[in-house]
Structures are given as C-alpha cells and as structure tokens.
Image (cartoon, rainbow, N blue to C red):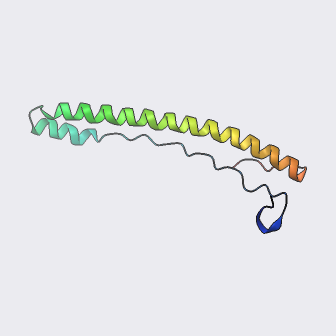
Amino acid sequence: MPGPWGYQNYVGPPPVRPELPRDVKPTHILHLLLTIITAGFWVLVWIVVTANMAANNRARRARYRAGLAAWEIAYVEWQHRYHAVYGAPPPPAV
C-alpha cells in the first residue's frame, strides 16, 4: 500500500516517547491551618486527601512505565522498518 504522496516505502515519524508524570502533593500548610481552626477535626480529611493523592501518583507512574515499555517496543520496530526501507541507521531518539 503506498504511503503519503504515492511513495511505496514511507516509514513515517518515530513514535512519541511518553512524558514523565509529575507527582501531585497536597498543600500541607493549608491543611495544617484548617486542622488548627477546626480543633483537629480536619486531620481526617487531610489523611484521606494525602492517601488519595499518593494512590493517584502510584497509578500515574504505573501507567507511565507501561507506556514507556510500549514505546520502547514501537521505537525498535520503527528503527527496523527505517533501516529496511532506507538502508541506513535511523537518526537518534530525541
């Protein structure tokens, strides 16, 4: 099947590497002030919020690791296609 512009052996751009996720952290100063204002009752909310954010950060990092593994496989396959079509090594990954 021809590629864009009628070329038979078009490889296309390399796959895009996933971005490293940034951890989300609660604003501890705000929660400390709310705990002081509410005479300690806000501690329960603070614990739940912190635990929820930690779980979300773990899930985000796990998705990143899975996406990175898939990207590595796709990039190696792209390198093989590039070499087979153009007969030269592909440019390095950015």
Residue 89 visible in rendering = no
Q: Foreground: 83 or 43? A: 83
Q: Is residue 67 above or below residue 11?
A: above
Regarding residue 58, the answer to whether it shows in the image is yes
Q: Give the image quarter of residue 34.
A: top left
Nearer the observer, 8 or 56: 8
Q: Nearer the viewer, residue 12 or 18?
A: 12
Asked which quadrant contains residue 48, the reply is top left
Residue at the outermost front position: 1
- Residue drawn at x 58%, y 40% is 67
Figure label count: 0
- x%, y% of residue 73? 69, 38
Q: Is residue 70 left or right of residue 87?
A: left
Residue drawn at 38 percent across, 41 percent down: 24
Residue 66, given in percent of the width and then of the height, sits at: 57, 35
Position of residue 5 measured from the top left corner of the image (x, y, whole percent): 79, 69
In the figure, is residue 48 to the left or right of 13? left
Q: Residue furthest bottom?
A: 5
Q: Position of residue 57 (x, y in %)?
A: 42, 36
